[in-house]
Image (tube, rainbow, N blue to C red):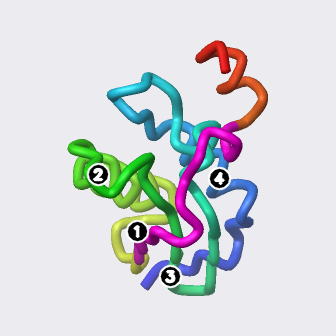
Amino acid sequence: MANTAHLSSDQIREALREVIDPEVGINIVDLGLVYHIDPTPDQITIDMTMTSPACPMGPYIQDDVEQTLKDLAGESTAIQVNVVWDPPWSPDKMSDWAKSYLGA
């Protein structure tokens, strides 16, 4: 396994800004979908949500998160993406930029 000890939560969060929700056209970080990032020496664990449990792009977004993290940390790094529904997502979780972009 690769050693991910050199990666901080902030570095991982910045990489996840490359993952775009194709329905909205905004990255998952600014949408407020990423709840928790836990890098350990040999694994990256992400707790995230979708805008709704019925989100048709959920599997696509999850695959994109996993690939983005593999690209960042290396193919041998274990990636665990947990899609959680508590707390439920709401527009107040979006960054100020995303709210402004969407006119919220």
Report the residue marked by disc 3: 43
Q: Are marks 1 and 2 in contact (CB under 8 Å)?
A: yes
Mark 1 vs mark 4, CA separation in Å: 16 Å
Mark 1 vs mark 2, CA separation in Å: 9 Å
Report the residue marked by disc 1: 83
Q: Which mark is residue 58?
A: 2
Q: Are marks 2 and 3 in contact (CB under 8 Å)?
A: no
Q: Quick one: 13 or 90, which is closer to the camera?
A: 90
**Relative to 23, is 39 above or below?**
below
Report the residue marked by disc 4: 13
On the rendered structure, is 7 left or right of 46? right
Q: Nearer the viewer, mark 4 or mark 3?
A: 4
- Judged from the image, the secondary structure of the residue bearing numbered disc 2 is helix
In what quadrant of the picture does the C terminus appear? top right
Number of other residues with Cα within 10 Å of mark 2, as a class: few under 14, some 14 to 19, many 20 or more: some
Q: Nearer the viewer, mark 3 or mark 1?
A: 1
Of the two numbered discs 1 and 4 on the same chain, state the one appearing first in sequence: 4
On the rendered structure, is 53 left or right of 17? left
What is the magenta range? 80-94
